[in-house]
Amino acid sequence: MMTTRTLGYVVPLLYTLKTRSKNGVGKWSWVMIYFVPMLLLAWFFTGGSMAPSTARWVGQGGLLAAAGIIPAVLSLFSVYEIGHLHHDTSARTTKQAPVFWLTPEEKAEVRAQLWALTVLKLVVALGLAAFSVWLASGAGIYAAQGTAAWGIGGHPYYSFGLLAGAMALLLAVLFVHYRLQGKASILTFGLLSMLKYAAPALVLLPLDLRSIPVLLMTVFLACSMPCLMEYAAHKGVAGIRGWASEIDVLRIRYYCVLSALCGMVWAVGKIWSTVEPFLPKAGGLIPASGPWGLSLHAVEYIGFVDALLVYFLIYWGVLLVYRSSQEWGRKLRGVLGKNM
C-alpha cells in the first residue's frame, strides 16, 4: 500500500526539492538559477528577436506563451525524478548517499512502490507536456510557426513529439550517468545540464531548423558551461581542480569575461545600426547588417545572451557576498566565544 508521503513524490519537483536542496536558501537558489532563466528563454524564443515576425505576441497571447513553459518544466522534472528515485533506492548508493537524501525508512517505502511511482510519474509527465502544448497552441504559437522560414511544421504534435523525445533521451542519459564513475561521467553531466534547460523550450521554440542550434548555444554558454566546470573541478580535471573549493569565484570570472565580450559586440552592433542609415550607399541600398558581417538578428541574439550572462553574474555575485558574510559571521562568533 502506497503511503501518503510516497504518493506525494508523484508531484513534480517535490522529490527534487526534498532530496537535492539542503535548506531554504538552496530551494530559493534553485528557483533563481533555473526558473527565471527558463522564463527569459521562453520570452526570447517567442516574443523576442528570434521569433518569426508573426509570432511576437502581446497581451493574453504573450501570457499564455510564457505560462506554457511552466508545465513543460514540471513534465521534464517528473521524468528526471524517475532517475533520482531509481538511483537513490539502489543498493550500491546506500553508503554514498548524502545525509539529506532518503532515510532508511523512506528508502524502504519508495523501493516497495518504485515501479508504481515510475508509471505514475510518466503519466503525469506526458499529461503536463500535453497541457503545455495546449497552452502554447492557445497563444497562437503554432499558427505563426507555419510561416517560419526553413520551418518543419506548424502543428502542436511536432512540439509534443519533440518534448516527449527529449524526455526519453534525458531519462536514458540519466540512467547511464548514474552508472558511470569518475571523470567518465563529465560528458553525461554536460548533456543532462543542456537537456534540463533546452528541452522545455522546445514547446515554445519556432519549429525552424535555425532556432535549435541557437537555443543549444545559448543554453551551453549561459547555463551549462559553468555547471560543467564545477562538476569537472570536483572530479579532479587538471587545470581547474584547484578551483573546487572556490567555484563561486570561478563562475563570477567566467561570467565577467564572457558578458564583457558579448556586451562589446552588442554595443558595437547597436552603434552600427544607428549610424548605418547615414553611411554612403554605393550602388544602391546596402544590406541591413551589423558589424563583422553579422546580421541585425544576430546582434539582438548576442544582446540577449549578454543580458542572461549579466543576470547570472549578479546572482552569483550576491550569493558569494551572502556566503562570505555567513562565513565571517561564524568566525566572528567563534572569536567572541573564545574571549568570553
Image (cartoon, rainbow, N blue to C red):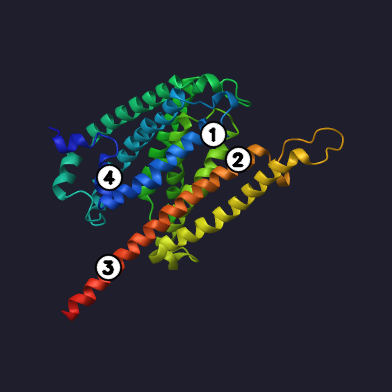
Element type at mark 2: helix
| 218 horizontally vs 10: left or right | right
Residue at the location (45% across, 36% down)?
A: 199
Q: Are marks 3 and 4 in contact (CB under 8 Å)?
A: no
Count of numbered circles in the view: 4
Q: Earlier in the sequence, mark 3 or mark 4?
A: 4
Of badges 3 and 4, the one in the foreground is 3
Viewer-closest of 261 and 202: 261
**Is label 3 in a helix, a strand or a loop?**
helix
* Residue beneath disc 1: 48
> At 59% from the left edge and 41% from the top edge, which residue is drawn?
301
Dot 1: element = loop
Q: Amino acid at mark 3?
A: Gly
In the picture, the disc for residue 300 is: 2
Q: Residues within 10 Å of mark 4 (few under 14, many from 20)?
A: some
Which comes sooner in the sequence, label 2 or label 3?
2
Crowd class of label 1 (few under 14; some 14 to 19; many from 20; radius 10 Å): some
Q: Can residue 186 be spotted in the picture?
A: no
Mark 2: few/some/many CA within 10 Å (<14, 14-19, 20+): some
Q: Determine whether label 2 and label 1 are within 8 Å by CB.
A: yes
- Mark 2 or 1 closer to N-term? 1
The residue to which callout 4 is attached is: 17
Estimate the spatial distance between the alpha carbons at disc 4 and disc 2, rounded to whole Å: 35 Å
Separation (CA) of disc 2 from disc 1: 9 Å
The residue where tag 3 is placed is 329
Cα distance, mark 1 to mark 3? Answer: 44 Å
**Up-down relation of residue 217 to residue 95 (above or below):** above
Q: Earlier in the sequence, mark 1 or mark 4?
A: 4
